[in-house]
Image (cartoon, helix red, strand yellow):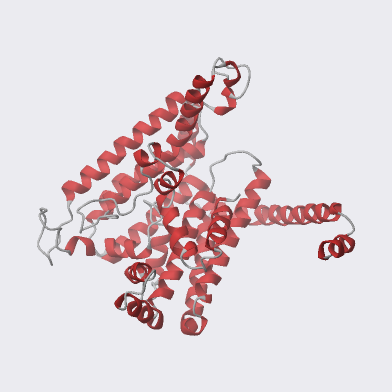
């Protein structure tokens, strides 16, 4: 009955299609006008766009057959290593914040030009919302992080839609990736500030003390990640533009950022039976740090080599056609499976490269150290063997893009009623990915 009334009111399904087309054209028209007016202004703010340097990168791009933005992106990921060494050598937190902010902004401008303005705008509005709602945080309750969530995800969705308009079914490296990472980082911060408020923290502590079934572990984790004070602007924007995680993650929490900047993990007692400094002293663990970062750098270069050497031969654009000697249509079944697997491995290798090299530079800067284990796995994004050898879909999912998986689990799946948690989690994941 309701559907019949709706059908009669709308006239026909064509009405819905026409309305969607009109809305889409209106959106793209407005977006194009805003881009035309704001784009040149944003581009003028990119100070690290030197003509001689640009010409050199263009020449390098032509020689390797890659888009200049991709080459700048690769250079930024590599530059993060020497920058991380300098960052780690700075001992005063304020100097680390300034270094993180300045290098992150300059690298963002170097890679994306005027598009660097997007994370500044997205993060700036988010910080303003947090600041304005701070006096009434208790009255707003969970509404405060939800408002932040709506802003961050809304801004990201507009970017996804505009990318659909300008690069339909294409793959162009732009600022959307860093915006996705920033959405994770700031939305997590908003919920952690909520968890750190006195009444909520007290509620969690009582649940842990009473060992509430099904809640004790969740509440303990929230207390561990909770933040009790509002970050100042320097801390916030240094976290937003942190040069080791801005481009490809890992999207670690604000608490991880602050504790590493303040060297808190390196002042804790080492695990029983392990070598390390006594409690209260500072041991930056340069030996294990360099080993972890260097190993991940070398491994990432292997993945890059796989992508470069095999990418032109094993790609789906060719093997799904009929002209290639590796065309799947011309192969027996077992060989089809083998070729398809190699194509997928080559596709995955670029993600393995970006995630692994970024994790290594983050470790070199001091992020991700776990004193209890004595390892540098605290900001891990990918478990390559865990994914490639996964015995089930569930296991492979948990090994892939691990920081995003944790974000979806902590701030969607475990925050809503069980009757709808899967729907909400999958919907959030789809919107975040722009699907």
Foreground residue among 245 and 227: 227
Q: Quadrant for the N terminus, please.
A: bottom right
Q: Quadrant of residue 225?
A: bottom left
Give the answer, above or below, for where 204 lies relative to 6: below
23 left or right of 114 in image: right
Residue 46: give x, y in percent of width and height: 50, 52
Where residue 148 appears, as percent x and y from the top left, is 53, 69
Residue 40 vs 185, above or below: the answer is above
Horizontal side of residue 99 vs 194, given as left or right: left
The answer to whether any part of residue 52 appears in the image is no
Q: What residue do we see at 65% from left, 52% from top?
A: 161
Residue 277 in sight from this viewpoint: yes
In the figure, is residue 283 to the left or right of 355? left
Query: In this rendering, is residue 268 above or below 395?
Result: below
Q: Residue at x 38, y 56 (%)?
A: 242
Task: Name the spot of residue 16 as percent of width and height, x first.
Answer: 81, 55
Quarter of the view holding residue 193: bottom left
Residue 38 position in % (x across, y down) = 63, 57
- Counting the numbered discs, the total is 0
């Amino acid at each position: 009955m309701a559907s019949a009334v709706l059908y009669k009111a709308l006239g026909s399904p064509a009405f819905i299609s026409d309305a969607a087309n009109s809305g889409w054209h209106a959106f793209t028209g407005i977006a194009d006008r805003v881009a035309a007016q704001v784009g040149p202004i944003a581009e003028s703010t990119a100070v690290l766009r030197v003509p001689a340097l640009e010409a050199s990168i263009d020449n390098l791009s032509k020689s390797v057959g890659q888009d200049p933005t991709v080459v700048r992106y690769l250079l930024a990921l590599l530059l993060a290593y020497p920058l991380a060494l300098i960052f780690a050598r700075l001992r005063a937190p304020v100097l680390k914040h300034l270094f993180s902010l300045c290098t992150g902004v300059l690298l963002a401008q170097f890679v994306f030009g005027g598009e660097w303005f997007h994370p500044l705008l997205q993060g700036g509005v988010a910080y303003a919302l947090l600041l304005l709602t701070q006096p009434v945080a208790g009255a707003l309750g969970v509404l405060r992080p939800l408002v932040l969530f709506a802003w961050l995800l809304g801004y990201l969705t507009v970017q996804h839609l505009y990318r659909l308009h300008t690069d339909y079914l294409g793959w162009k490296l732009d600022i959307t990736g860093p915006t996705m990472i920033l959405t994770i980082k700031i939305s997590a911060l908003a919920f952690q500030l909520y968890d750190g408020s006195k009444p909520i923290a007290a509620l969690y502590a009582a649940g842990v003390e009473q060992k509430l079934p099904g809640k004790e572990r969740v509440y303990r984790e929230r207390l561990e990640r909770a933040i009790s004070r509002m970050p100042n602007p320097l801390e916030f924007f240094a976290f937003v533009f942190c040069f080791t995680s801005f481009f490809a993650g890992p999207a670690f929490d604000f608490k991880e950022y602050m504790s590493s900047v303040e060297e808190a993990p390196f002042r804790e007692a080492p695990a029983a039976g392990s070598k390390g400094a006594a409690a209260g002293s500072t041991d930056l663990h340069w030996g294990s740090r360099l080993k972890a970062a260097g190993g991940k750098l070398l491994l990432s270069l292997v993945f890059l080599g796989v992508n470069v050497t095999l990418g032109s031969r094993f790609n789906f654009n060719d093997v799904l056609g009929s002209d290639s000697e590796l065309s799947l249509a011309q192969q027996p079944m077992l060989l089809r499976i083998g070729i398809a697997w190699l194509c997928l491995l080559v596709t995955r290798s670029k993600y393995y490269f970006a995630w692994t090299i970024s994790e290594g530079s983050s470790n070199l800067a001091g992020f991700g150290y776990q004193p209890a284990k004595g390892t540098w796995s605290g900001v891990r994004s990918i478990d390559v063997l865990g994914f490639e050898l996964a015995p089930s879909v569930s296991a492979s999912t948990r090994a892939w893009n691990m920081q995003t998986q944790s974000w979806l689990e902590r701030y969607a799946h475990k925050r809503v009623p069980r009757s709808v948690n899967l729907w909400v989690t999958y919907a959030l994941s789809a919107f975040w990915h722009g699907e």
